[in-house]
Image (cartoon, rainbow, N blue to C red):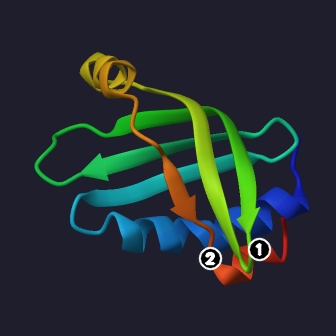
Amino acid sequence: MFSLKDSLITTVIKPFINSYISDLGEVSDLSLSSKNNQMTFTVVLVGESSPIEVKILDYAIEKEENNSYLVIKDMIFSREWINIALKKWKPELKFPVPSLARHFL
């Protein structure tokens, strides 16, 4: 189901993500379901011949003082080796939310 809120958020965060990963690649597709705390996107990586699909299965927005952060709790990639690495090393996946996007959260 189309959500105007989700559409606005993706419009704001897609350029932010692309700026954040500009040395690695670019997000070509992005969809968000804020109701289900899920996000799906395609990343075209530098030097790769085919894009990678990323599915964020669960996320939360955490607020600390005047800042908001996207905390990714569960995600999977279309590349199995990335899934294995994430399970093995369990990095904290916490990213600042752009100030413009905070107004929609």
C-alpha separation, residue under disc 2 versus residue under disc 1: 7 Å
Towards the viewer: 74 or 63: 63
Residue 18 position in % (x across, y down): 41, 67
Q: Crowdedness of circle 1 by 10 Å Cα count: few (<14), some, many (20+)?
A: some
Q: Crowdedness of circle 2 by 10 Å Cα count: few (<14), some, many (20+)?
A: some
Residue 22: quarter of image? bottom left
Q: Are marks 2 and 1 in contact (CB under 8 Å)?
A: yes
Q: Which residue is mark 2?
A: 98
Is residue 95 shown above or below 60?
below
Q: Which residue is mark 1?
A: 102
Q: Tag 2: residue type?
A: Pro
Q: In this image, 71 relative to 21: left or right? A: right
Q: In this image, 70 relative to 3: left or right? A: left
Residue 48: quarter of image? top left
Please state, as top left, top right, bottom left or bottom right, where the N terminus lies in the image.
top right
Q: Residue furthest front?
A: 65
Residue 57 position in % (x across, y down): 64, 29
Count of marks overlaid on the render = 2
Dot 2: element: loop
Is residue 56 shown above or below 97?
above
Q: In this image, 52 relative to 105: left or right? A: left
Please state, as top left, top right, bottom left or bottom right, where the C terminus lies in the image.
bottom right
Towards the viewer: 50 or 79: 79
Residue 59 position in % (x across, y down): 68, 41
Q: Residue at x 31, y 19 (%)?
A: 88
Towards the viewer: 44 or 39: 39
Residue 38 position in % (x across, y down): 70, 38
